[in-house]
Image (tube, rainbow, N blue to C red):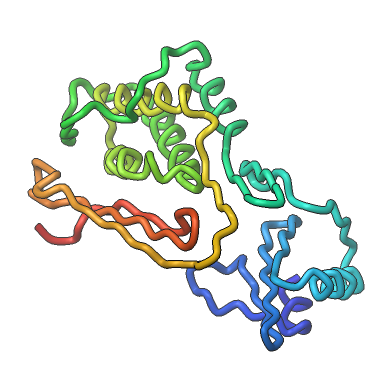
Amino acid sequence: MTENLLKLNFKNDDLDDATLFVKKVGKTVVYLVVYVDDLLITGNNESYIASMKKELKKGFEMTDLGHVHYYLGIEVIQHPKFIFLSQKKYIGDLLNKFGMDDCKPLGTPMEQNLKLTSVEGKEFEDATKYRQLVGSLIYLTTTRPDISFDVGILSRFMQKSCEGHWSAAKRVLRYLKGTQDFGLKYTQVGDFILTGYSDSDFDGDKETSVSTTGYTMSLGSGAVSWRSRKQSVP
């Protein structure tokens, strides 16, 4: 498939994302995302996109399913005035998988002022289960920047998790229970203004005295990039 895309002058210059291909012709831009046998194509010229679909069909069998509604666990609602991205079904499946369907929702994903360390009670008996939950939560941050900080903290204990870490991870599920409808909404705006916010928790890690830095970048009406990461030096 990559060979066919390159023949159509699509380029992949992003070393961090081998699935994204871009084609530019003057002011026309087409973006194409490839995941196994699923394709997602978009751009700023509908007629040119239609011509690209015809060219792609010449190279391999392809079924056009129209506007995207669900892609890799991400639900897409398209409206003339906005696009809304969420993972409501993914959250529901996650709650079911870990037996939290009937849990009581909480208003925050982590207890206020909680500082987790490498030792939080007894070692958790099912390390694989902890890794599966945290790994699933990491993917959920695709549309939920509000849990990025908490999930980043939990991911530090993937190698050796304790009962306290597991309790903190389940609290995130309880928060998600009450916020399944949350997501990212992008509305039409007159000016696309790039706005950034950043913050850090001074001396957040009590064992290493290292802080955690977080940022969010918004373009137009909604967040387009965000991250929460432990600093490399104290």
- In the visual, does 95 lie left or right of 227? right
**Residue 32's spot in the image, x, y percent?**
69, 67
Disc count in the image? 0
Q: Is residue 191 above or below residue 149?
A: below
Q: Is residue 183 left or right of residue 105?
A: right
**Residue 204 on image: x %, y %:** 14, 44
Q: Position of residue 173 (x, y in %)?
A: 42, 25
Viewer-nearest residue: 155 or 214? 214
In front of the other: 9 or 75: 75
Rendered residue at 41%/18% (across/down): 105
Q: Quadrant of residue 111?
A: top left
Horizontal side of 206 relative to 42 (left or right) equals left
- Is residue 228 depicted above or below 15 in this figure? above
Q: Residue at x 19, y 33 (%)?
A: 116
Q: Quadrant of the C terminus?
A: bottom left
> Residue at point 48% right, 53% down?
222
Give the residue displayed 76% in from the left and 70% down from the top.
Answer: 1
